[in-house]
Image (cartoon, grey):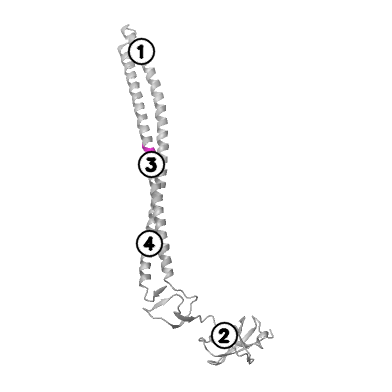
């Protein structure tokens, strides 16, 4: 895989697309909240309307029972009064009163029945509002599905940005760069060297005749040629598992069988406490390890 080192034009486009997707996500979240509030309000209003309509129907039915009873009484009174008028047993005024009462009660009964139909229509209308609640719920589901699709796209763009971003393992100082803007790089190619000024350590090559006494955690003192009067303190962090000749770029084989014994060196890493002066990588130092502790 080859990539071009540049000023991040593709990453900039990806970040713009990510910002657009994040804006759409925020808009969908707001619309979902608004629709949810509208659904809850509609549901509460509809439930109250249905309950009120049912209560009104119950009241209208009770009113019909009363009106029907009153109408029956009025008809019975007029049925008794009507023949008595012809017989001269009652006055015309009493007959008119009985007739008027009957007509009034019949009208009241018809009005009560009409009122019941109105209440039933109100219940039907209130019940129909439940369909509005279902429609809002479906709309919320559609919005959530769209949001999930947008979130997946945002994750994809975020991963694309992450794939195009090289992150250093720590905050530090760049010592040297091996590429320039516009160069093509390959996977595994060295791009730059850097170091962490807060994580200072010394690599000392200790003779194999002395490394046997070195242990992790032993105190050490270090003098730096760049600062002759400065004495640094630290501790042994790691003792190498092989001599330095095993890591030589060009190892020296011995095909002739002749052998000259040479004292080998073992790398020992010493962690340095935070120094008073900045130390640059590659400085020459002298190390003293207190093997008695």
Q: Nearer the viewer, residue 192 or 279?
A: 192
Q: Quadrant of residue 241?
A: bottom right
Q: Is residue 132 visible?
A: yes
Q: Quadrant of residue 18?
A: bottom left
Please state the extent of the stretch shown in magenta in the rendering.
125-131
- Say whether marks 2 and 4 touch (CB < 8 Å): no
Label 2: few (<14), some or many (≥20) within 10 Å?
many
In space, the residues marked 1 and 3 are separated at their CA atoms by: 52 Å
Separation of residues labelled 2 and 1 (CA atoms): 125 Å
Outermost residue, top direction?
87
Q: In 3D space, how far apart are the residues under numbered discs 3 and 2 (Cα atoms)?
A: 76 Å
How many angstroms separate mark 4 from mark 3 (CA)? 33 Å
At mark 2, the secondary structure is: strand
> Quarter of the image containing the C terminus?
bottom right
| The N terminus: image quadrant | bottom left
Mark with earlier residue (2, 1): 1
Determine if the magenta segment contains residue 142: no
Pointer 1 local density, CA inside 10 Å: few below 14, some 14–19, many at least 20: some
> Residue drawn at (37%, 61%), measured in percent from left and top?
21
Q: Which label's residue is closer to the chain start, 4 or 3?
A: 4
N-terminal label among 1 and 3: 1
- Give me the disc on residue 131: 3
Q: Earlier in the sequence, mark 2 or mark 4?
A: 4
Q: Position of residue 206 (x, y in %)?
A: 62, 87
Instruction: Name the residue at 36% across, 16% down.
Output: 75
Cα–Cα span, label 2 and label 4: 49 Å
Secondary structure at numbered mark 4: helix
17 lies left or right of 290: left
- The disc placed on residue 79 is 1
Secondary structure mostly seen in magenta is helix
């Amino acid at each position: 895989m080859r990539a071009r080192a540049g000023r991040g034009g593709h990453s900039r486009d990806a970040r713009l697309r990510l910002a657009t997707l994040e804006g759409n996500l925020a808009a969908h979240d707001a619309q979902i909240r608004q629709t949810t509030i509208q659904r809850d309000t509609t549901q509460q209003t509809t439930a109250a309307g249905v309950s009120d309509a049912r209560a009104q129907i119950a009241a209208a039915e009770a009113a019909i029972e009363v009106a029907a009873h009153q109408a029956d009484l009025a008809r019975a009174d007029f049925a008794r009064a009507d023949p008595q008028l012809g017989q001269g047993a009652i006055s015309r005024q009493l007959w008119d009163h009985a007739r008027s009462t009957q007509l009034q009660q019949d009208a009241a009964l018809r009005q009560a029945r009409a009122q019941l139909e109105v209440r039933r229509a109100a219940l039907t209308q209130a019940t129909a509002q439940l369909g509005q609640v279902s429609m809002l719920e479906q709309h919320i589901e559609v919005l959530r599905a769209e949001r999930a699709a947008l979130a997946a796209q945002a994750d994809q763009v975020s991963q694309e940005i992450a794939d195009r971003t090289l992150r250093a393992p720590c905050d530090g100082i760049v010592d040297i760069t091996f590429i320039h803007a516009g160069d093509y790089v390959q996977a595994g190619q060295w791009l730059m060297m850097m170091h962490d000024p807060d994580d200072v350590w010394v690599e000392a090559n200790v003779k194999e005749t002395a490394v046997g006494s070195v242990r992790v955690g032993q105190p050490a003192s270090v003098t730096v040629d760049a600062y002759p009067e400065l004495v640094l303190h630290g501790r042994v962090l790691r003792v190498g598992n092989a001599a330095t000749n095993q890591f030589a770029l060009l190892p020296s084989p011995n095909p002739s069988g002749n052998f000259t014994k040479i004292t080998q060196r073992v790398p020992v890493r010493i962690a340095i406490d935070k120094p008073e002066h900045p130390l640059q990588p590659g400085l020459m130092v002298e190390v003293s390890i207190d093997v008695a502790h």
